[in-house]
Amino acid sequence: MLEKIALIFDFDDTLAPDSTTGFLNFMGHDPHTFWKDTVDPLLDEGWDPATAYMFRLIELSKSLPPGERFTRGKFIDWGRKIKFYKGVPGLFGNLDSEISEISQRTNKEIVIEYFVISSGISDILCNTSISGNFTEIWSSGMSYNGENEEIHFPRNVISFTDKTRYLFQISKGIIGEEFRGKPFEVNRRIDPANYYIPFNRMIFIGDGYTDIPCFSLVQRNGGTTIAVFDKERRDKWERAWEFSEDGRVAQLASTDYRKTSDLYSVLIMAIEKICSGIAEKGEGR
């Protein structure tokens, strides 16, 4: 029987620096002005952060001359250029090799499935150099207008507790093309004994406040949670430390995914612990 582990990532500031900030730089706009002068005032008025940034992005695009507006094609172009934190491009092959060795050692057929759950823009994230490693990338989407496919309106927005919906989709196996356009399938009742991937076989890696509901849900149900931070940015480090102090995450590590890093060691220990449960008694089934 094939046994599965889910390794689930946030994207922005987890696998790579913030993709929307990078897009604004790519298009020649000042990210500081965008976030501080246009998005933050909406947050002060009570807007949801994901809705606020998408609204302001559309508003900014519409204020530009036609040839400079934000389009699906420009999102795709930027996605293909994104640079990742150290070790990210090779992480998936390295972990697949590790799990193959563990499978041979335990005489169990075990695989890792990789997922992204992010508030970032879908057409950016789904066109990066690593996108092919993921079973699913769930992220906020734009609708497009006109021949040039200029951004027109948010198609879907993923924020805070919205992210937990996709953890339930992973657990129930509501994954793939057959479930596109069927948002209510997540409410399908499935006995936990028949879960596609139980919560205690999930590892969730994130960095920010929008990840807190996922941290809580995964940790409460026996999974592993890891908060990552860019150690060159004190604000990110302090935030991750707060998550640890509050008991929201089990582990802290910097955004270095190379085989020699602490984060990689933490991942291997988490994977081995799950595999040990699978080998001993099929834990979680």
Image (spheres, rainbow, N blue to C red):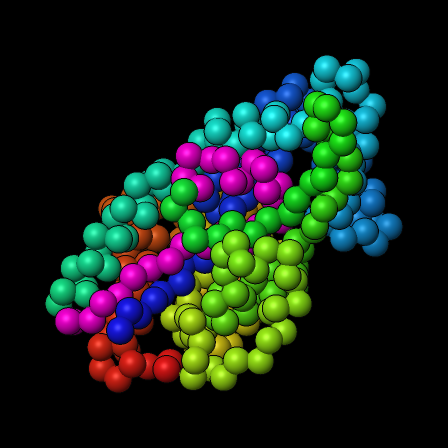
Q: In the rendered image, which quarter is residue 250 located in?
A: bottom left
| Residue 124 horizontal side relative to residue 156, left or right | left
| Quadrant of the rendering where the N terminus is positioned | bottom left
Give how far across and how far down residue 99 sits, in percent: 23, 59
Residue 151 versus residue 132 in the image, above or below: above
Give how far across and how far down residue 251 sits, in percent: 41, 62
Residue 136 versus residue 164 in the image, above or below: above
What residue is shown at x 50% (from left), y 56% (from top)?
176
| Quadrant of the rendering where the C terminus is positioned | bottom left
Whether residue 36 is visible, yes or no, is no
| Magenta region, residue range | 106-131
Camera-side residue of 195 and 178:
178
What residue is shown at x 65% (from left), y 62% (from top)?
183
| Residue 63 horizontal side relative to residue 239, left or right | right
Residue 120 versus residue 65 in the image, above or below: below
Give how far across and how far down residue 178 sits, in percent: 53, 58
Whether residue 8 is visible, yes or no, is yes
Q: In the rendered image, which quarter is residue 280 located in?
A: bottom left
Any magenta on residue 165? no
What residue is shown at x 44% (from left), y 41% (from top)?
131
